[in-house]
Structure formats: structure tokens, C-alpha cells
Image: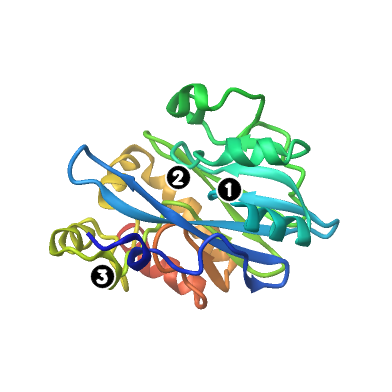
Amino acid sequence: MPDDGQATYPPLNTLKGVADNLWIVDGPIIRFGMPWPKMSFPTRMTVIRLSDGTLFVHSPTSLVPQLKAEVENVGSPRWLIGPNRIHYWWIPEWRAAFAQADVYLAPRIEEQAGDRIDFDYRALGSDGGYPWDAEIATLAVAGSYMTEFVFFHRASRTLILTDLIENFEPRKVGSILMRWLTRLGGVQDPDGQMPRDMRLTFAKHRPQLKAAIETMIAWDPERIVIAHGRWYEENGADELRRAFRWLLD
């Protein structure tokens, strides 16, 4: 395996401007998967500043002091988002630091996280819309294992995904075994897609998944931010067509 410095996207734990009022933060490595082999996943969160100066924080990464100061300099965190059942780990740190923020969690996070989620939160997927609806569109993509919520920042035409597309660069994966596994799994750059094992969990939801992807394409995103691997700085709608050609064709 590569060392963490090779596998990540430095500089880490710092705001990086992507568009007006939108930043990403590349975070540390997590290791996830079967007992063996576990794969190294670089992490990434997205921060959006709304028109009132409040911040929408998607899939928070580790809240180091430098990052906390940078975030406070650009706005006040108002919403902390756990977009699917496996993206929640650092939310308790952020909630402790920003007590005024509301936490929104995807279904089954509490089941997955156990006593790590020991505070009140709001459920993504509840009826009645969301307080950010005027500036950020929200779409639930439901499978049998998990529901992922995707978001579209209208002003910057930025689509924010979590695990629906993964895109690992071979030079950052390191070992021959892991390069082979990412290619076999359909998540290797430049043709990163939905992981093949994840596709199986959408087998009974294929029409709904297709409809969701068609909605995202209709949004005509300029860029797509993903949580793991190289993200897409341009041609977002075309990247969706490429990544989901197995579903759309």
C-alpha cells in the first residue's frame, strides 16, 4: 500500500476554493472493506456558503484547529450532513464544536454508528423539504443496503456525490493488488463508476436509480465533487453519462 501522503490529496485539512461560496476539504485516509484486504480511502468534504452566510457542511472530515479557524472565517456552520450510512465518523466532533448547527443524517446511520451518535439529529428523507431548498437541491437515491442523498448547488452548478461514483487514481493506490481490485470494481480513474458491489444493492431499485441519474443529468452540473478519489472539475453531465452508461444504455 502507498503511504498516506501518497494516497491523499494534499494539502489536507484546509479549505480549497472550487467556485464562489463553495470549498472542498481533502481529509485523512480511512481504511474500509472486508477484514482483508482493507482499502485506503482518501476522504473529502464539501462546504457551501449560503446567501445568509451560513454553511452547509457535507460529509465532514477531521476537524483540526486550523480547519476550524478557516471555517469560522468564512461563515457559521448551520447544517452538518451525513449523506449515507457510512459517512458519519467525524460528525460528533463538528457537533461538539458548533453546537448551533443542526445535524441531518441519512437512514441507518444510527444503526451503523451505535453509541457514536448519542445526540439529537434530524432525518434526511423526512417530508416537508429542507431549509436549504432555495439554494441547494436534494435528491434521495435509495438502494437495499443504503440510501445516499445527493445535492446540487444551483449557483455554482456543482453536484455533490459521496459513494455513487468512486474514482481511484492508480498512481495513488500503490500496490498491484489494489490497482487490480479498483479496476475490477469499476472504480479506477479515468473510468470511475459506482462500485460493482454497490450496484448489486440497487438491483431491485434499478428504475429508481436510472430516474435519479437522469434527474442529475438534467441539472446539467458543471462539476462533480466526490468523496473518494479524483473529482471532476468540468463536463459534469458528460461524466454522469459515462459513469452510468451501464444503467442508461
Sequence-earlier tag: 1 or 3: 1
Q: Which of 95 and 108 is in front in this view?
A: 95
The nearer-to-camera label among 2 and 3 is 3
Label for residue 243? none
Residue type at mark 3 is Pro
Secondary structure beneath label 3: helix
Residue 161 in percent (x, y) is at 50, 55
Residue 212 in percent (x, y) is at 50, 52
Give the farthest residue toward the front: 65
Residue type at mark 2 is Gln
Task: Kindly identify which residue carries mark 3.
Answer: 170
Label for residue 139? 1
> Where does the N terminus fall, quadrant-wise?
bottom left
Sequence-earlier tag: 1 or 2: 1
Secondary structure beneath label 1: strand
Q: Nearer the viewer, residue 241 or 86?
A: 86
Residue depicted at x 67% and y 65%: 22
Question: Is 61 displayed left or right of 228 in the figure?
Answer: right
Label for residue 208? 2
Residue depicted at x 59% and y 22%: 118
Sequence-earlier tag: 2 or 3: 3
The nearer-to-camera label among 1 and 3 is 3
